[in-house]
Image: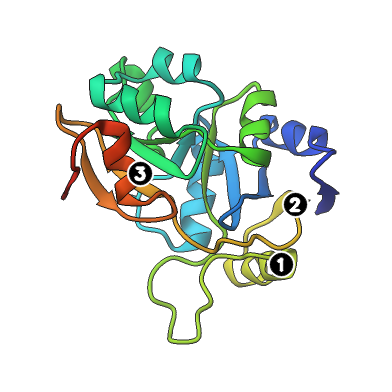
Amino acid sequence: MRVVDTQDLDPAVRALEAGELVIVPTRRWYMICADASDEQACASVFQGKKRPRHKSLAYVAPSPAACERYFDLGIEAERLATGLWPGDLALLLPWRNPQNALRHAAVGSPALVTMASGVLRALASAAKVPVAATTANLSGDTGPDDPGPAVTVEEVRTFLAASGLTASVIVDGGVCPAANHMTVVDCFTEEARLVRTGLVHHRAVSAALGREIRTV
């Protein structure tokens, strides 16, 4: 396992393209990443995290053009993407091509799509493979003392030891300050609906839409 800083992403990009796992920092917390089209790599993430397969990994779109190439964005999804991406917002979107949904089964259909900022976006932009990501922690209720996803490299190491996963590269971004989830909005239907609140406040979502958003 190699630890690099945020200015040296080449090892992480090469590892991801080789079907290996990498861990990178975000403003929220550290995320474990895999090639979204690599069934074996993604399966190892589900197994190590003890994550139910119906809880899909997030697809990290490197650009608006890439997002539009693979996903159908309705009027409200376009408003949210324009107003709040890149950032801490994920949209549930339909695939344009059903074959892509089959090829990226770990991402699911509808797909949970985000356009991240910072290191995660840089990784997705540089890699020649699509990036799937999820938080660096065990899934489910692991007890009252569970701190949640890793916010330091030390906590990343603890997670790897507990999960049995091997990450080829960890990108050390220091302490992740927010320790909160992405906001999730369901754009699979014509009228977008709020699924989960997080760092992007529901008032900001409503402002981007130009109407008060309803909760699922």
Which residue has dot 1 on it?
Answer: 157
Between 180 and 92, which is closer to the camera in this rendering? 180
Q: Position of residue 159 (x, y in %)?
A: 62, 68
Q: What amino acid type should be assigned to the residue bearing mark 3?
A: Ala
Q: Position of residue 181 (x, y in %)?
A: 44, 57
Q: CA distance from mark 1 to mark 2?
A: 9 Å
Identify whether 81 is placed above or below 166: above
Q: CA distance from mark 1 to mark 3?
A: 35 Å
Q: Who's the residue at 43% across and 34% down the image?
A: 84
Residue 179: quadrant of the picture: bottom right
Is label 2 in a helix, a strand or a loop? Answer: strand
Few, some or many residues within 10 Å of mark 2 (<14, 14–19, 20+): many
Between 195 and 146, which is closer to the camera in this rendering? 195
Q: Who's the residue at 33% across and 55% down the image?
A: 197
Whether residue 192 is visible, yes or no, is yes
Q: CA distance from mark 2 to mark 3?
A: 32 Å
In the picture, measured across the screen, residue 13 lies left or right of residue 86, that is right
Q: What amino acid type should be assigned to the residue bearing mark 2?
A: Ile
Which residue has dot 3 on it?
Answer: 204
Q: Earlier in the sequence, mark 1 or mark 3?
A: 1
Q: Who's the residue at 67% across and 35% down the image?
A: 16
Q: Position of residue 11 (x, y in %)?
A: 81, 37
In the picture, measured across the screen, residue 138 lies left or right of residue 71, that is right
Which residue has dot 2 on it?
Answer: 170
Q: Quadrant of the N terminus?
A: bottom right
Q: What amino acid type should be assigned to the residue bearing mark 1?
A: Arg
Whether residue 54 is visible, yes or no, is no
Is label 3 in a helix, a strand or a loop? Answer: helix
Task: Indicate which label's residue lies in the foreground, 1 or 3.
Answer: 3
Task: Indicate which label's residue lies in the foreground, 2 or 3.
Answer: 3
